[in-house]
Amino acid sequence: MDRLRVLALVGVALLLAVAACGSGGGKKAGSRVPGRVRVVHVSLPASGPLGRCLASASLRGRRAVVVERFGRVTRSLTIVGQGRPEIFACDRTGVRFEGREWCGFSSGRLRDGRVNDARLDILCVDRRGRHVASAFVNPVRGARWIGVDQGSYTELYPTAAGLPVRISSTRGVDFARARATFWITQLGADGRVLARARLAAHVAG
């Protein structure tokens, strides 16, 4: 990414340690698959992939915080202008939608660091042609990981920068009704389960 200054990068050793923690249900360690995240500060305007993401955002100000996530299916950017309540997300799977690098875009507002709407997007597809649902999850107090049930494994999304976590899945997607369901487990730094929930989200509008 262009003009980015890395502030924090989750260590591989820590990711693997949490992935190896027992789930309390007798699952094998390999059933938890950690993603990667980094937090950067950027100067605006930006160029490159970030600039093309921000072309869809009405971002004001000279600086922004960007949380970049690398998952099994998607790469996402979560963007907040410093001192601003707006939050934006761009999602991509490597499969272009209408020729665009970023196949999904969402925007919302923060209140006390949280979103009151998941800002679901289901336009992206993976390389097998399946629709991919992406949404925001508000971490509970003490959560370091958001686990998303992907069927044969649980994908772990690290929390970062005190912001909602952008998650993705090809499970539970009802494209015809513009909705998706996620099965979520929130974990502490030691892998202990803090909360479980079923998130049923609808495309806004």
Image (spheres, rainbow, N blue to C red):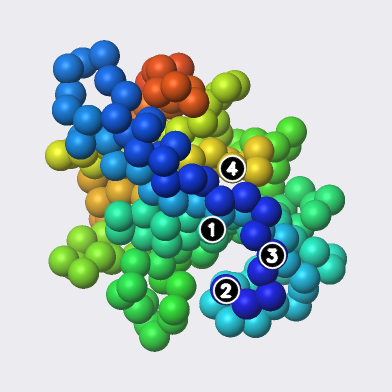
Q: Assign a secondary structure to mark 3.
A: strand
Q: Which mark is in front, 3 or 2?
A: 3
Which residue lies at the image location 38% right of the left edge and 31% below the top edge? 18
Q: Are marks 1 and 2 in contact (CB under 8 Å)?
A: yes
Q: Disc 1, disc 3: CB below 8 Å?
A: no
Residue, x 26% and y 55% (percent of image)?
176
Between the C-alphas of marks 3 and 2, the distance is: 10 Å
Distance from disc 2 to disc 4, alpha carbons, whole Å, reads 18 Å
Image quadrant in which you'd find residue 113: top right
Residue 54: horizontal and vertical position, in percent? 63, 72
Q: CA distance from mark 1 to mark 4?
A: 10 Å
Taking the spot 51% from the left edge, 31% from the top edge, the residue there is 144
Crowd around label 3: few <14 · some 14–19 · many ≥20 (10 Å): few
Disc 4 crowd rating (10 Å Cα; few below 14, some 14-19, many 20+) is: many
Q: Which mark is residue 5?
A: 3
Q: Which residue was labeled with disc 2?
A: 1
The correct choice, above or below, for 37 with respect to 47 in the image is: above
Residue 106 — which label?
none
Residue assigned mark 4: 160
Residue type highlighted by circle 3? Arg
Q: Is residue 59 above or below residue 23?
A: below
Instruction: Between label 4 and label 3, give the one nearer the viewer.
Output: 3
Element class at badge 2 = loop
Q: Which residue carries the number 1 mark?
A: 68
